[in-house]
Amino acid sequence: MYNEAGIENLREKSLRLTDYMMYLIDNELSRYGFTIGNPREDKRRGGHIALEHEDAVRINAALKDMGVIPDYRRPNVIRLAPVPLYVSYHDAWVVIHKIKDIMDNKVYEKYENKRGLIA
């Protein structure tokens, strides 16, 4: 599949997905105290978003219970890695809006503020 898709095409889609997610974070999540911890420049950014928030560990747990597969990194980072081979722009939109729902409804408050064995 990778050979058929082409590494250049996959990298380009990865950059566009992360650009789109950063746009959504800036416009939908910044009011909740979220910041972006990774470089914004294409040449300096990998294929993930480092979403920073003081309640990252609890938000990360809530996302897992909603079927999202994030990765928590100390002290306050939720890593989101949209895989360009099968993640769509709609999928990216859904994840950001799940986070918005977690914040609007204070779902994260149901979770302990400590990391589990598997982040």
Image (cartoon, helix red, strand yellow):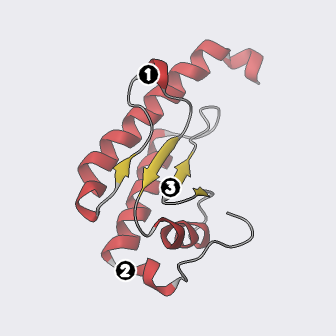
Looking at marks 1 and 2 on the same chain, the residue that comes earlier in the sequence is marked by 1
Mark 2 touching mark 3, by CB under 8 A?
no
Tag 2 secondary structure = loop
Residue at image location 33% in from the left, 49% down from the top = 25
Determine the CA span between mark 2 and mark 3: 18 Å
x 52%, y 56%: residue: 78
- Residue 106's disc is 2
The residue pinned by badge 3 equals: 77
The kind of residue on which mark 1 rests is Asp
Residue 39 placed where, x, y %?
A: 42, 32
* Numbered label attached to residue 42: 1
Q: Are marks 1 and 2 in contact (CB under 8 Å)?
A: no
Of marks 2 and 3, which one's residue comes earlier in the chain?
3
Q: Is residue 22 above or below residue 39?
A: below
Among the two numbered marks 3 and 1 on one chain, the one whose residue lies closer to the N terminus:
1
- The percent position of residue 46, horizontal first and vertical second, equals 55, 30
Q: Position of residue 9 (x, y in %)?
A: 58, 16
User: Distance from label 1 to label 2 (Cα)?
Assistant: 33 Å
User: Please, what secondary structure does the residue beneath circle 1 have?
Assistant: helix
Q: Residue at x 53, y 68 (%)?
A: 57
Residue drawn at (60%, 13%), measured in percent from left and top? 8
